[in-house]
Image: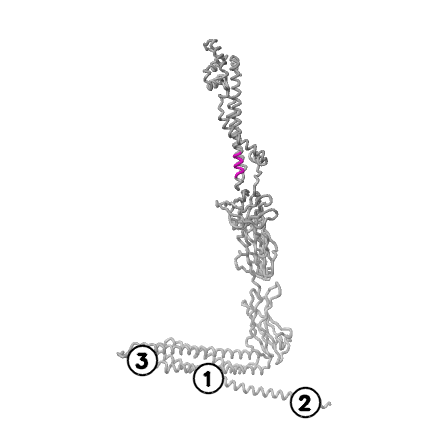
């Protein structure tokens, strides 16, 4: 109480003290109502923002937003307390101010209360007033005190307005606390304690995870999809994959949504939504939903998504698209089998980057070194060959895990290599990397055998010139020529005698098998007429990975005959050559006749027309059609002449080839007689000098000249005079050819007569030998009869 009030009338003092107390209570009430209004408004506003979105499928306010709201409410309450309560309570309330406040709302006091209060202040000085006047004022003010209503001093509208706000909100809060204490408590905890307990929903969704197909290296290794779960609402998947999102909704304790929708946002700003489809029926109290289409099919970028079903949501899930490891380079290092390696070779004989169609040598040791775009955690590999699956010898990684080496030894078959790289987190490529390694098989060698100057029969003392050609895809290790006596079967009956000719770089080699020397040395059993020998060649390479590669040529079966029998065979072949020569002479004679006809008739009409120096004058009766007919007839005749000349040229070429073939056959006869050691100088001269050499001379000189002349006729077929002259020269040359061929034929007839004499002598010798054998047999029989 103000000390000055001791000088006032007790009634006035009581009035002012009561008014002062009321003012302070008013301040407290006004401040509390303001604080309560802010708190209640914030509570219901926060509850609405936190709960109402849940009813329409949204989510609760995040903790950060609730924290901001709580901070704002705290700041507002603190501000109200400081401004409305503390600041106003700290203001002094002197008696004169309170008296003035009363005088303002009670004009009938006419200033008496203020005058009494102010003049009664003990510290007041310098005033000149009558004490009587002061007592009268006091008495009048005290007398009018009963008319003073302190309630008129206060403005009740602010309190009423605040009460209208606080009252309903408070009643609603009390009702919520009474009828739904769980909801009230959850709201209080979420708004004040920032609890994360969600509001209960009608639907209850649960994230199951993502099913991702398992990529395997083997085509026939089918595995069920792998279920991946979210960790802190995040999951990492390889780019290019097509995962399946799986959720489920509780069916026993909640309502199953009719449809669940994904709302997604990709890292490039693309937004969209996609519905999940219901799968099957309710099992174990849950209904499953899946999404296996866009935006998950062919995943290319990171996305954030939420799933809504009725009033429940699964929010802020992230699928992070990770670039899977890829093999960008494959180095193939090859070490050949030992039998194919050169001295001084390093660790590898072949080092190259993989390319389509790469083929390796059979039996090689292979190292596949693959380089990845990212560090590898592991790889899945499958190696399949024609013989089945192959297990690598070893799989090693580099120190930075960016390279992997696969060791394969002794590759025998074409192999398909499938590799699936995985990063340390298990992210794998979505398809295996395929490589195909072909194999170049070491083929057996090929060997051919030729007997030069040997027919199908030989004498026991023959010398066999042998030529062989042995080829291999790498190199010939050994080649041999073998001879062995043979019976009726192709297989040899005794151990063969072999010799190894020296092969040139092209695989060709020559050797000789002298039957006489082999028999004399005891290497070969004595050969008798009527028997047979087998001659063949063999070749082997250095292949040592399995069964040796041994190739055998065609087997030549040679009948062993006497010299007389061999000569008889050769003479029959000579008779065949004579028949061929006679046919060639007939064809040459026809050629000569054709050329002679062309010379005599073929150019006569044209020549007559050409000899006339005066051109024929056209008459009026000559029509254009007659001229055209004449020109056509001339062209036709020229084409016929050209055709006959060309046919003559073909016949001349055929005659040349036939005569060359006869000469070559005579060469074979001579060589066969020499190799079988039944040759004589006289016979060689008769066949070689008397027949073979003249035939070759005819081919090289007159017959070649005849071919050139026929070609020259074809070149001037449109010049009748020149063509006729050249045709006459060709006819003369053909006559010369005929004369020389006839001379050769007569020589062969002489040889035939000589051969007939030889046949008669051979028959006499055979009869004599038979007679001697019979005489010896009879003599032995007579001697044996004497001892009977």
Residue 38 sits inside the magenta stretch: no
Q: Is residue 714 above or below residue 545?
A: below
Is the residue marked by circle 2 packed among few (<14), some (14-19), or many (20+) residues within 10 Å? few
Residue placed under numbered mark 3 in the picture: 609
The single residue placed furthest to the right in the displayed view is: 788
Q: Which element type, helix, strand or loop, lies under badge 2?
A: helix
Tally of numbered tags = 3
Magenta residues, as a range? Answer: 44-52
Q: Is residue 230 visible?
A: no
Q: Which element type, helix, strand or loop, lies under badge 1?
A: helix
Q: Is residue 494 above or below residue 276?
A: below
Choose mark 2 or mark 3, whichever is in front.
3
The C terminus - image quarter? bottom right
Choose mark 2 or mark 1, whichever is in front.
1
Disc 2/disc 1 C-alpha distance (Å): 55 Å
Q: Which mark is residue 763?
A: none
Is the residue marked by circle 3 packed among few (<14), some (14-19), or many (20+) residues within 10 Å? few
Residue placed under numbered mark 2 in the picture: 779
Disc 2/disc 3 C-alpha distance (Å): 94 Å
Circle nearer the N terminus (3, 1): 3
Circle nearer the N terminus (2, 3): 3
């Amino acid at each position: 109480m103000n000390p000055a009030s001791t000088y006032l009338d007790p009634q006035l003092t009581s009035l002012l003290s009561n008014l002062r107390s009321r003012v302070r209570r008013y301040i407290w009430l006004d401040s509390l109502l303001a604080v309560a209004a802010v708190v209640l408004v914030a509570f219901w506003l926060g509850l609405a923002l936190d709960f109402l979105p849940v009813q329409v499928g949204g989510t609760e306010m995040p903790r950060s937003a609730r924290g901001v709201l709580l901070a704002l409410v705290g700041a507002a309450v603190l501000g109200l307390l400081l401004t409305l309560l503390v600041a106003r309570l700290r203001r002094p309330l002197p008696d004169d101010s309170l008296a003035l406040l009363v005088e303002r709302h009670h004009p009938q006091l006419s200033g008496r209360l203020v005058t009494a209060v102010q003049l009664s202040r003990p510290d007041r000085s310098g005033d000149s007033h009558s004490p009587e006047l002061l007592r009268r004022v006091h008495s009048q003010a005290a007398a009018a005190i009963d008319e003073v209503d302190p309630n008129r001093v206060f403005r009740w509208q602010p309190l009423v307005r605040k009460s209208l706000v606080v009252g309903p909100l408070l009643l609603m809060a009390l009702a919520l606390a009474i009828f739904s204490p769980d909801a009230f408590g959850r709201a209080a905890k979420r708004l004040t304690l920032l609890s994360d307990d969600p509001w209960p929903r009608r639907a209850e969704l649960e994230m199951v995870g993502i099913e991702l197909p398992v990529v395997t290296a083997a085509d026939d290794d089918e595995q069920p999809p792998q279920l991946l779960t979210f960790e802190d609402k995040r999951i990492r998947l390889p780019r290019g994959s097509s995962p399946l999102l799986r959720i489920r909704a509780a069916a026993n304790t909640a309502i199953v949504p009719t449809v669940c929708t994904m709302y997604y946002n990709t890292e490039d700003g693309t937004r969209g939504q996609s519905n999940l489809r219901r799968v099957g029926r309710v099992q174990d109290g849950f209904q499953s939903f899946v999404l296996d289409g866009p935006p998950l099919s062919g995943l290319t970028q990171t996305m954030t998504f939420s799933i809504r079903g009725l009033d429940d949501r699964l929010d802020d899930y992230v699928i992070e698209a990770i670039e899977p490891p890829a093999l960008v380079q494959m180095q193939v290092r090859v070490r050949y089998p030992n039998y194919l390696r050169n001295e001084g070779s390093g660790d590898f004989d072949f080092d190259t980057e993989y390319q389509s169609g790469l083929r390796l040598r059979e039996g090689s040791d292979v190292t596949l070194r693959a380089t990845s775009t990212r560090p590898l955690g592991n790889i899945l590999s499958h190696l399949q060959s024609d013989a089945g699956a192959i297990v690598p010898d070893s799989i090693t990684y580099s120190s930075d895990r960016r390279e992997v080496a696969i060791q394969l030894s002794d590759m025998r078959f074409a192999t398909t290599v499938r590799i699936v790289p995985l990063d340390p987190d298990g992210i794998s490529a979505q398809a295996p990397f395929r490589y195909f390694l072909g194999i170049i098989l070491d083929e057996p060698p090929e060997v051919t055998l030729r007997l030069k100057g040997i027919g199908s029969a030989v004498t026991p003392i023959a010398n066999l010139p042998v030529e062989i050609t042995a080829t291999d895809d790498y190199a010939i290790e050994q080649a041999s020529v073998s001879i062995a006596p043979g019976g009726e079967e192709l297989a040899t009956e005794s151990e063969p005698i072999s010799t190894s000719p020296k092969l040139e770089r092209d695989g060709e080699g020559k050797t000789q098998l002298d039957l006489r020397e082999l028999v004399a040395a005891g290497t070969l059993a004595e050969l008798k007429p009527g028997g047979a020998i087998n001659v063949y060649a063999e070749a082997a390479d250095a292949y040592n990975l399995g069964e040796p590669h041994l190739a055998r040529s065609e087997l030549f079966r040679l009948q062993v005959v006497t010299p007389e029998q061999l000569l008889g065979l050769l003479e029959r072949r000579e008779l065949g050559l004579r028949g061929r020569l006679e046919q060639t002479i007939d064809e040459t004679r026809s050629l000569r006749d054709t050329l002679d006809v062309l010379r005599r008739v073929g150019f006569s009409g044209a020549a007559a027309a050409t000899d006339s120096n005066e051109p024929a004058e056209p008459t009026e009766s000559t029509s254009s059609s007659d001229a055209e007919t004449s020109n056509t007839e001339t062209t036709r005749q020229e084409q016929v002449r050209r055709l006959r000349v060309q046919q003559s040229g073909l016949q001349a070429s055929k005659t040349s080839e036939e005569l060359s073939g006869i000469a070559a056959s005579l060469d074979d006869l001579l060589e066969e007689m020499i190799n079988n050691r039944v040759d004589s100088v006289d016979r060689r001269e008769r066949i070689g000098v008397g027949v073979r050499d003249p035939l070759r001379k005819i081919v090289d000189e007159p017959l070649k000249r005849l071919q050139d002349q026929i070609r020259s006729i074809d070149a001037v077929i449109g010049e009748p005079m020149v063509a006729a002259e050249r045709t006459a020269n060709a006819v003369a040359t053909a006559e010369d050819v005929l004369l020389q061929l006839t001379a050769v034929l007569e020589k062969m007839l002489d040889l035939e007569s000589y051969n007939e004499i030889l046949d008669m002598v051979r028959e006499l010798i055979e009869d004599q030998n038979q007679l001697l054998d019979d005489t010896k047999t009879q003599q032995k029989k007579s001697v044996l009869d004497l001892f009977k």
